[in-house]
Amino acid sequence: MKIIRFLAGTLMIISGVWHSILAFQTAESRPPMIAFAIAYLIIGILLLINNSWGIYLGAVLPLAGILAASIKIGWSNFDTSMMILIIIDIIVIISCVLMLIYRKKPAIQI
């Protein structure tokens, strides 16, 4: 699970940096892109330091990003950059869901 967590955290940081670069290239969607960039960077850092909040947020927020992008931009208008970001989001969602499913549960103490 450590490798999956590091993969998800690294991909979130890459996605956060990429979102910030894209935010300054387009003026029309700058505030949402900056918000997602900051959120993705925070989630990436939380995943790398093994914080459980990062796993929960990593399973939910990229899904919101995919939905927001598909509603705002539309699937037919996606370019290569957006498709790569969607693929990164899907990988992170799957990784975080797997970490939630297979996390170690504490033993019952009597």
Image (cartoon, rainbow, N blue to C red):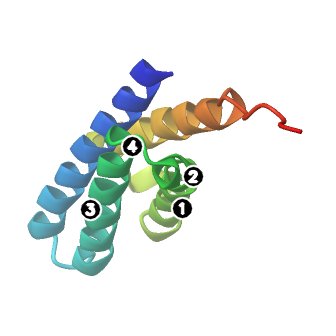
Task: Rate crowding at label 4 as few (under 14), some (14 to 19) or many (20 or more) other CA atoms within 10 Å.
Answer: many
Marks 1 and 2 sit apart, C-alpha to C-alpha, by 13 Å
Give the residue type at disc 1: Ala
Which residue is label 2 attached to? 56
Q: Are marks 4 and 3 in contact (CB under 8 Å)?
A: no
Give the residue type at disc 3: Ala
Task: From the image, state whether disc 2 or disc 3 is nearer to you.
Answer: 2
Question: Where the C terminus falls, by quadrant?
Answer: top right
Expressed as whole percent of the image width and height from the top left, the position of residue 67 reads 55, 60
Expressed as whole percent of the image width and height from the top left, the position of residue 19 reads 23, 57
Which residue is label 1 attached to? 64
| Residue 110 sits above or below residue 44 on the image | above
Marks 4 and 1 sit apart, C-alpha to C-alpha, by 18 Å
* Number of the label disc, if any, that sits on residue 37: 3
101 left or right, relative to 6: right
* Number of the label disc, if any, that sits on residue 47: 4
Q: Are marks 4 and 2 in contact (CB under 8 Å)?
A: no
Give the residue type at disc 2: Tyr
Give the residue type at disc 4: Leu
Task: From the image, state whether disc 4 or disc 3 is nearer to you.
Answer: 4
